[in-house]
Image (cartoon, rainbow, N blue to C red):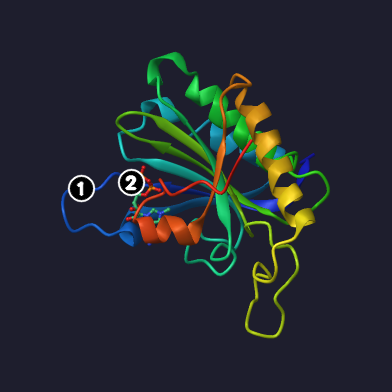
Amino acid sequence: VKHPLMHKWTLWFTKPPTGKGDNWNELLKEIITFNSVEEFWGVYNNITPTSELALKSDYHLFKEGVRPEWEDIQNKHGGKWSYQFKDKRSVAIDDVWLHVMLAAIGETLEEENDGEVMGVVVNVRKGFFRVGVWTRTIGKSIPGGGDGDVAGGKGRPTERGQEILKNIGRKFKEVLTIPANEVVEFSGHTDSAHAGSTRAKAKFVV
Ligand code: M7G
């Protein structure tokens, strides 16, 4: 008997650059899509743990049909919650990433199917591990409508939309089990793309 997940999920991997001239697109590889708890464990038990990945590697676990890129139509109006573990030796990153993935596929990051969570990411970098949750909007829950806004992430910012985002941030923080005085930061992908990196100005913190 297989226990179905609410959504199908696809695991992606970003290979570290081999030298100069690699572009992002060539480094991003789709690994596998699954839609049951049993398949998830099958995948999990057969991939390299985050703690053993080379620097500049990433894992991305996204809803099927959403590429883990700012440019994807379902991400382009969105953003992400993220947190950096700067003391790499003191964090059990494999446990953290496992719990973040379980929260995503178990749909516990959102309260009622808000359709905000697109995927979760872990980045292995020289000075830190960064873990993130990508959202479809930046708190603008009213669909734009009529102007090709397929993802529905445009439109006016709403208090309700921003509350939904903050609840995701709070839940994410719980899953990370970081001290209450630490903050997770939200930033929009448009800012990230302009900054040339994900270290963009945070719009919210929780
Ligand atoms: P990062 O991995 O988010 O953060 O972005 P880092 O600076 O801590 O490593 C690193 C670089 O990867 C960016 O500056 C971009 O060149 C590229 N990159 C990352 N993402 C998530 C994207 C994306 O969604 N689209 C494109 N085109 N490039 C990206």
Task: Indicate the quadrant where residue 171 lies.
Answer: top right
Local SS, label 1: loop
Residue 182's place in the image compared with 8, above or below, is above
Kindly tell me whether residue 69 is visible in this rendering. no
Identity of the residue drawn at 20% across and 47% down: 18
Which x, y percent locates residue 33?
Answer: 58, 52
Task: Indicate the quadrant where residue 107 lies.
Answer: top right
Residue 55's place in the image compared with 77, above or below, is above
Name the residue type under label 1: Thr
Local SS, label 2: loop
Identity of the residue drawn at 63% across and 21% down: 180
The CB of the residue at mark 2 lies under 8 Å from ligand 1? no
* Cβ atoms at labels 1 and 2 below 8 Å apart: yes
Disc number placed over residue 18 in the picture, else none = 1
Q: Farthest bottom residue?
A: 146
Task: Indicate the quadrant where residue 97 lies.
Answer: top right
Disc number placed over residue 15 in the picture, else none = 2
| Quarter the N terminus occupies | top right
Count of labels in the image: 2
| Quarter the C terminus occupies | top right
Identity of the residue drawn at 44% across and 30% down: 50
